[in-house]
Each structure stands twice: as structure tokens, then as C-alpha cells.
Image (tube, rainbow, N blue to C red):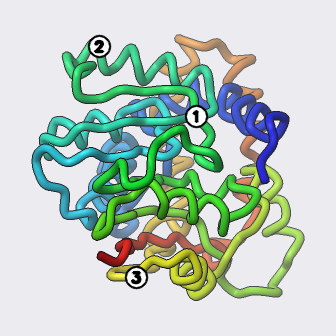
Amino acid sequence: MLDVTGSAEIGRHYDERAPIGDEFRGGQLHMWYWYDRDDDAPLPEAVHRITRKVTDVLGLRPGEHVLDAGCGSGEASLYLARRHGVRVTGVTVSEYELDRARERAVAAGLADVAGFGYGDYMRLPFEDGSFDAVLALESLQNAPDLGQVLGELFRVLRPGGRLAFSDFSLEKAGAEPERVEQFMTTLKLPVLPTLPQWLSYLRTAGFDVEEYTQCGPRVFGMKSKYLQAAMDRREGVAGKFGEADIAEFSRLHRGFFAPRRDQIGYVVACARKPR
């Protein structure tokens, strides 16, 4: 079980990285998606493709209530409220992310339908069956006990409610494990499941798996495109934060790039709580 120290540590992890990452990626802190090496989409657009790809499989309907579990700086929640006419509740253990999400909601005129709070998804302060859908964009990966957090998300969903998530997966298990270990340490990942293991976690928690895809080649496999796209935005970001902060941001993420392109996958999955 994630204790207070664990929650605080993950919160600090994102507090350190989120401000500059938020600036680079246009208010979104998750991965990117490029179709091929000739795809010239700017970095924020490539990142928003993941937002759309994951949220589209939820099949949201106007008026539904969505839990954004690990809401980041709030941009995905606001997109859901605007695009689908849903009510969103976002939780995060990062004080920076919480402040930015609330600011964005007010600036967008959506504070009445998108609310954000400090919350640990291992112990959610919501009654059983409170939500029609749950979104988890690269947030499950930091859970110290995937079975427990999936059980908690299962609990707060109504019967027939849906969960959609995206997260990293392990490809080519056993190949150059030191590279994968650097990656996991950098991102504070307690485990790195394979795609079949991710699906097994869902089924063990009681979910019916309805859709899944492995799109690693267009995500982590495009890490060189990310580096180029980030360099294209570097001057503007450095002008806001300073060269020293940019250098520290780069140092903190060095281990992220250690694995080969084919070692790290990226899973998008949707599952349903049985009626």
C-alpha cells in the first residue's frame, strides 16, 4: 500500500519535472505519437494525439461523470469537458499540477464542470459507483500495487462503467536489462508489465477487457523525433526558465532515453466493469 511518504515522493517527482515538461508539451505531460519519421506535427500536437487516442475509446456521452486519475496539469480533463460535455473530477499528488489544473479550469471558464483535488488513487475519497468512466494517462505506472489501484478504480465505477488507460510496457524482456532499469528508475516505475501482463491485471481486478493496442513504435520508438522537436522549442522554454533549469531537467530525464527503441512499448487499453 502506498503510504504518505510514497505519495509525497511521487508528488515531488512530478513537482520537479512538470513545470518545464508542461511548457514543452503544451500543458500535457504524457507521451507523443508520430505516424512516421516524415510526420512534421509539432510536439504539443503529437502529445495531444495520445490524449485523443486514449479518451476516444471511452465512448463518452454528454453529462457523464469522469474521474481523471492522475490528472497532470489538467489539460486532458478540460479537453474532455469541452469535447464531450462531461463533468470531470481530477486527482493528483503533485501540488504544482493541482495549482495549474485549477488555474486552467478557471481561465477556460470550465471550473463548474472540471474540478481538481489532491488525492491518492490508492485510497479514493469517493463512494462506490460514483463515476461513469475513469481515465488514467500514464498514471497507473507509478502505483506500488497495481492490483490495489485497479481494485479501487473498479470500486468507484458504476456497473457498466469504463476505464481507459495508457502506459509503458516491456518489450524484448531480458535484453540489456540495465537499460530498462535506468528507464524505470528515472520514471519511478515499481514494475514494467508486458502487454499480456497489463491485460491480466485488468481481468484479475474484475474488468472485462474490450479494446487494446500496442503502439510503442509510434511512441517511444519516436524518441529521436521528440529530441528534435524539443530542441526546436528549447530557446523559448529556456527564455522562461533559464539555462540552469533546462540543464537540470535534461539531467533528470537522461535515463529515460537509455533503452533501445524496441525495448519499451506503449499500451492503450479500455475495459469495462460488468453490469
Q: Is residue 182 left or right of residue 235?
A: right
In the rendered image, the vertical position of residue 154 relative to residue 205, given as above or below: above
Q: Position of residue 217 (x, y in %)?
A: 48, 75
Whole-number angstrom distance, CA of label 1 to CA of label 3: 26 Å
Q: Position of residue 200 (x, y in %)?
A: 58, 85
Among the two numbered marks 1 and 3 on one chain, the one whose residue lies closer to the N terminus: 1
Whole-number angstrom distance, CA of label 3 to CA of label 2: 36 Å
Question: How many C-alpha atoms fall within 10 Å of the one at disc 2: few (<14), some, or many (≥20)?
Answer: some
Q: Position of residue 101 (x, y in %)?
A: 42, 24
Q: Secondary structure at mark 2?
A: helix
Q: Position of residue 246 (x, y in %)?
A: 67, 25
In the rendered image, the vertical position of residue 1 relative to residue 239, given as above or below: below
The residue carrying mark 3 is 209
Instruction: Look at 26% across and 67% down and name the residue there.
Output: 57
Name the image quarter holding residue 33.
bottom left
Q: Tell me the amino acid under the disc marked 2.
A: Val
Q: Tell me the amino acid under the disc marked 1.
A: Gly
Instruction: Look at 39% across and 63% down and name the residue there.
Output: 164
Pointer 1 with pointer 3, Cβ within 8 A? no
Q: Tell me the amino acid under the disc marked 3.
A: Val
Q: Which mark is residue 119?
A: 1
The residue carrying mark 2 is 106
Q: Is residue 46 left or right of residue 267?
A: left
* Visible residue check, residue 226: yes
